[in-house]
Image (cartoon, rainbow, N blue to C red):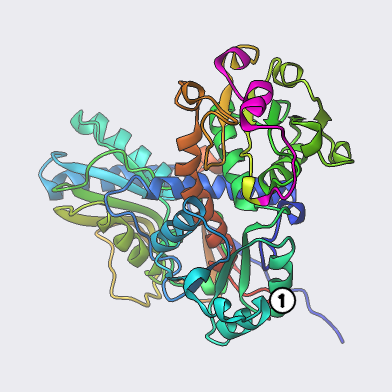
Amino acid sequence: MKKDLLGIGDLTRDEIYLVLDTAEAMREIGQRTIKKVPTLRGKTVVNLFYEPSTRTRTSFEIAEKRLSADTLNIAVAASSVLKGETLVDTALNIEAMAPDVIVLRHASSGACHLLSRICRSRVINAGDGMHEHPTQALLDAFTIREHKKRIDGLKVTIVGDLMHSRVLRSNVLLLTKLGAEVWVSGPPTLVPVGIERFGVRVSANIGEAVEGADVIMMLRIQQERMNGAFIPSLREYFNTFGMTKARVAQAKPDVIIMHPGPMNRGVEIASDVADGPYSVILEQVANGVAVRMAVLYLLAGGVEDETAA
Amino acid sequence: MTSRPRLREKAQVLDDAALDRALTRIAHEILERNGGAKDLAFVGLRTRGVTLAQRLNAKIASIDGAQLPVGTLDITLYRDDLDMRGAPVIRGTDIPFSIKNKTVVLVDDVLYTGRTIRAALDALIEFGRPKAIQLIVLVDRGHRELPIKADYVGKNLPTSLSQSVQVHLTEIDGRDEVEIRES
């Protein structure tokens, strides 16, 4: 593995499978009475979150604690950032205290790359703007593989706000790399120009996109990133692109429904679908811990390689 | 500069029959020492320790009729040398039974510095409080760096630090054999 995990784009197929296989072994630790191994004892991990997050931050923190790392959380709301400090200055100050890993969530795309260039610590991208969210894509792949035993050759349909979604970008990169057939669907105002170049099929008709799908992944309508009128109304969005039981019925009988959270019930997904038998949304959350343990172990568990020195 | 080819000798230490006899003897010793198979459980250390544990279990079954639980332990996450080794592949731990109040018999192929067993003891105790832990090794090659001793030994093999000992088992390597190599 490289020094940092900045995006799925930097990973090879083999590295992706190494993370998934390692996560398989990590999951067992979460089922023990004593859910802790001493692997990262004495290592310090800083969780630096510039955007609100419950799931990802908690998941990273649990993963770090299960590997016995010393963790600290910097929530920007209570930090010097409010006093006008830049990301670079904050990072250099944290770096001066010699952490081993920095987990960064930031509203600007590329923030993790910037940090990676100026820091000796290993950097894990926990979501940067509209760019990537690699650990989410890895846990999604882990969940898909667990249910379908493979990823190669599956039809995976991703529906929603394709424009602002870093989850989409990471998932498309990963799933196409592993040989899945990826379909995307969403309102034309939220479909980025040139998205076909990622190797996905685009359809404005959700029926066509969902037809015969093995996996349906719903994306959240990100109202906080929308600074314009992309959709007429949430109700209209639900009518056109919301995942309902009737639409699920067009997919394969053993389809699984995924959502990276947090869900807007009644906007992108109907409640009875979110809570239905084909929903694996809570499994995704559970698997997130094992996958993040695997990433932390593979990055921080071993030797400092040349790039870090 | 002239480079001399390095001497790479190897010698067989145990053949398949000797290996099998050693395991048969150990199976009898386990039963003798514990007064039967009651409350015993095997835990093999990945990878060859697991195979050896399964074979010992079959031997105990043929002697005593008892089927003992066999668990698998991967000690990678407990190693004290991760900083020197990179991040080795983890294959997972699977102990599908309670070790509480059981006599756990740890099985490994080669006992050397004792660091693997130290890690295994730490790992095992997190699964509960066994009544006792005993250790079986197929080969004890000496050079301990920790105060650890095996309860059952297939073969004591004095070695030098420059030598390496390799255990081959049919299930994994296609043949039963223990070799010592000069490297």
Toward which corner of the image does residue A50 lie, by quadrant?
A: bottom right
Q: Mark 1 lies on which chain?
A: A
- Residue B183 is at least partly visible in this image: no
Q: Which amino acid does label 1 sit on?
A: Glu
The image position of residue A173, as x and y in percent, is: 75, 44
Image quarter where the N terminus of chain B lies is bottom right
B77 or A4, nearer to the observer = A4
Residue shown at the point (27%, 37%) measured from the top left: B69
Toward which corner of the image does residue A91 lie, by quadrant?
A: bottom right
The image position of residue B138, as x and y in percent, is: 38, 54
User: For the residue carrying disc 1, how many other residues have a C-alpha within 10 Å: few (<14), some (14-19), or many (20+)?
Assistant: few
Q: Mark 1 points at which residue?
A: A306
**Residue A213 relative to residue A302: left or right:** right
**Residue B102 belongs to the span the image colors magenta:** no
- Residue B80 is at least partly visible in this image: yes
- Residue A253 vs A150, above or below: the answer is above
Image quarter where the C terminus of chain B lies is bottom right
The image position of residue B173, as x and y in percent, is: 57, 43
Image: magenta residue range: A225-247
Residue shown at the point (21%, 52%) measured from the top left: B128
Residue shown at the point (75%, 46%) measured from the top left: A228
B50 or A46, nearer to the observer = A46
**Residue A230 belongs to the span the image colors magenta:** yes
**Residue A117 relative to residue B148: left or right:** right
- Residue B3 vs A299, above or below: the answer is below
The image position of residue A17, as x and y in percent, is: 64, 45
Residue shown at the point (21%, 56%) measured from the top left: B133
- Residue A223 vs A296, above or below: the answer is above
